[in-house]
Image (cartoon, rainbow, N blue to C red):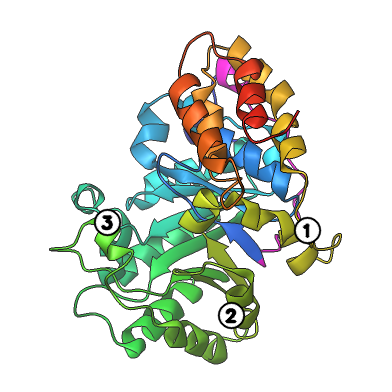
Amino acid sequence: MTQEYALSQSEQTCVPAKAARKPLNRRFSTAPMMDWSDSNCRYFWRQLTKHAVLYSEMVTTGALIYGNRERFLAYDEVEHPLALQLGGSHPTDLAQCARFAQDWGYDEVNLNVGCPSDRVQNNMIGACLMGHVDLVADCIKSMQDATEIEVTIKHRIGIDDLDSYEYLRDFVGNIAATGCKTFIVHARKAILKGLSPKENRDIPPLKYDFVYRLKQEFPNLEIIMNGGITNHEQITEILTHVDGVMLGREVYHNPALLIDVDARYYNDGSISEDGADKAALIRSLYPYIEAQLAQGATLHHISRHTLGLFNGQPGARRYRRYLSENAHRKTAGIEVMEQALALMGYH
């Protein structure tokens, strides 16, 4: 390891054992979501699906190079297969952080070229990079040269007036020339001025046909669809055109959607026709919760990610309300989870 990427002795003690390198099956993956897809959330999701590829929140290169690296990179081994998403636009910094991803045992490192917020634009991060294809290519190549794990990209179908299919095709073609094989495509363009990040997830129209055409023109690339996907029927149709799907807010608000992922997309198990034992899924978290509480976390840090699991069931509102009102207390423990389940009739 070169001096540029060397970790201190104290940091090395925090690095998990490397997972075996093998091609990732991105038939189904969960999206990077700021403030949501943290390690606690991913641990919970992993109780619902063994095979889906889980993505971290976006982490900026500055946070990793100058901040508390363990805070941003630590995770539980159960979270594999696991990808780290980076935000940045300086090839040298991204190369260094890609090496961090490898050293910490991540299975993939992904470059964010899709976030439309003003804050990241000001730092040349996210969707604005779609207007700088040569820079993006340099970033991807630098990351590839620095690491042995796969480097992938997540991007929009365009930005502002750069929104033709031809522009998207040429963008993908230029990035593919670096050797990048996996493109996660949010099937909306980003409007960089005048729309909030939330509005950019809803107002620009979805153009799945653009993504389908990419797969037709680049059959050797792995094309993953993202944006507006809400149910298994929709996923089944999309998978007749592209290689995989990525879901974000839908799986966060309705995590039960993950329960049948292994059976439907990885040929592992059978579909739970009348629902899984969701109380057992919650209770499978208890050893993890107790370990996190012993390290100073509060129950809310973990329980907040479970609030949507029982959506549509009698008592789901009581479950959410009880946890929202009680899990933030410093003394809250497993008994709070049990009381929330009891309000739904689980004993």
Q: Distance between the residues labelled 3 and 2?
A: 25 Å
Q: Is the magenta stretch mostly helix, strand or loop?
A: loop
Q: Is residue 46 magenta?
A: no
Asked if residue 178 lies left or right of residue 108, the reply is: left
The residue under label 1 is: 274
The residue shown at (34%, 49%) is 88
Q: What residue type is labelled 1?
A: Asp
Q: Which of marks 3 and 1 is in front?
A: 1
Q: What residue type is labelled 2?
A: Ile
In this rendering, is residue 32 above or below 132? above
* Disc 3 residue crowd, few under 14, some 14–19, many 20+, Cα 10 Å: some
Give percent across and percent down for residue 17: 73, 32
The residue shown at (73%, 30%) is 283
The disc label shown at residue 197, or none: 3
The residue shown at (45%, 28%) is 324
Of the image marks 2 and 1, the number of the one nearer the N terminus:
2
Q: How far apart are marks 2 and 1 (CA)?
A: 25 Å
Q: How far apart are marks 3 and 1 (CA)?
A: 37 Å
Label 1, secondary structure: give it: loop
Q: Do the residues labelled 2 and 1 touch (CB within 8 Å)?
A: no
Label 3, secondary structure: give it: helix
Q: Which amino acid does label 3 sit on?
A: Pro
Name the foreground residue: 46 vs 87. Answer: 46
Name the foreground residue: 112 vs 252. Answer: 252
Residue 260 seen in this snapshot: yes
The residue under label 2 is: 238
The residue shown at (74%, 42%) is 19
Farthest-out residue, right: 269
- Provide the residue span drawn in magenta: 9-27
